Amino acid sequence: DAKTTQPNSMESNEEEPVHLPCNHSTISGTDYIHWYRQLPSQGPEYVIHGLTSNVNNRMASLAIAEDRKSSTLILHRATLRDAAVYYCILTPNAGNMLTFGGGTRLMVKP
Amino acid sequence: NAGVTQTPKFRVLKTGQSMTLLCAQDMNHEYMYWYRQDPGMGLRLIHYSVGEGTTAKGEVPDGYNVSRLKKQNFLLGLESAAPSQTSVYFCASSYPGRGNQPQHFGDGTRLSIL
């Protein structure tokens, strides 16, 4: 399975945009890029996913590099509630399994 | 709409005891999954099911059994609990997909084995 690399932690100020990077240099042509987040003492929560084009939803935006070897999750205006561990995960076209890495712990300062 | 519900939320067991964790979903999802999460780590897949009456092994299946007798329920059993199985257990469900279907997670069962 293709792996992802994320920074262990990042800090942001409240009400500022946050760009969470993810490298996936061994991604295959049919792998989807998913992002989940996990708030303290809760189960993971789906954020967004994409294949080749940039994607927007009510929670975030996903920017995918043209060569698909990296992607960036964008939170347009961080709130204290966005403090969580964010996981970037590749899912192969042949199934729907998720393989979680260590993720990025996002801390939001008031 | 409850989504994915896990029962119980907390449990303490003694080594060698058995128990069953229940996961119920009301979204009519075909696929269901059991994960475990150890402190400071990401989730690891234990077993999963792609439909009623079917189950398959994930990354860390040893010491666990599962059953999917009804579409909406997925049971995880520990036959003889060991301290190494102390963890937080998460259940998830999704529609069938080729990598493009989000998984919906429950809030977890915190299991301690003494």
Image (cartoon, coloured by chain):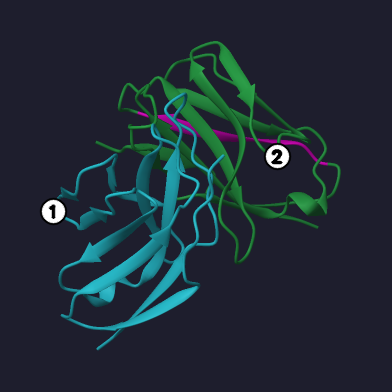
Chain colours: A cyan, B green
Quadrant of the rendering where the N terminus of chain B is positioned: top left
Taking depth in this image into account, of B18 and B96 the one nearest to the observer is B96
Q: Is residue B1 left or right of residue A4?
A: left
Q: Which residue lies under the disc numbered 1?
A: A58
Q: Is residue B62 left or right of residue B59?
A: right
Chain to which the residue tagged by mark 2 belongs: B
Q: Secondary structure at mark 1?
A: loop
Same chain under badges 1 and 2? The reply is no
Q: Is residue B20 magenta?
A: yes
Task: Identify the residue shown where x is 81% and y is 54%.
Answer: B83
Q: Secondary structure at mark 2?
A: loop
Which x, y percent locates residue B65?
70, 27
Q: Is residue A73 left or right of residue B75?
A: left
Q: Which residue lies under the disc numbered 2?
A: B60
Give, as a single range, the part of the protein colored magenta: B17-25
Please indicate, yes or no, whether residue A21 appears anywhere in the rendered image: yes
Q: Quadrant of residue A91?
A: top left
Q: Main secondary structure of the magenta part?
A: strand
Amino acid type shown at disc 2: Val
Which x, y percent locates residue B67?
61, 20
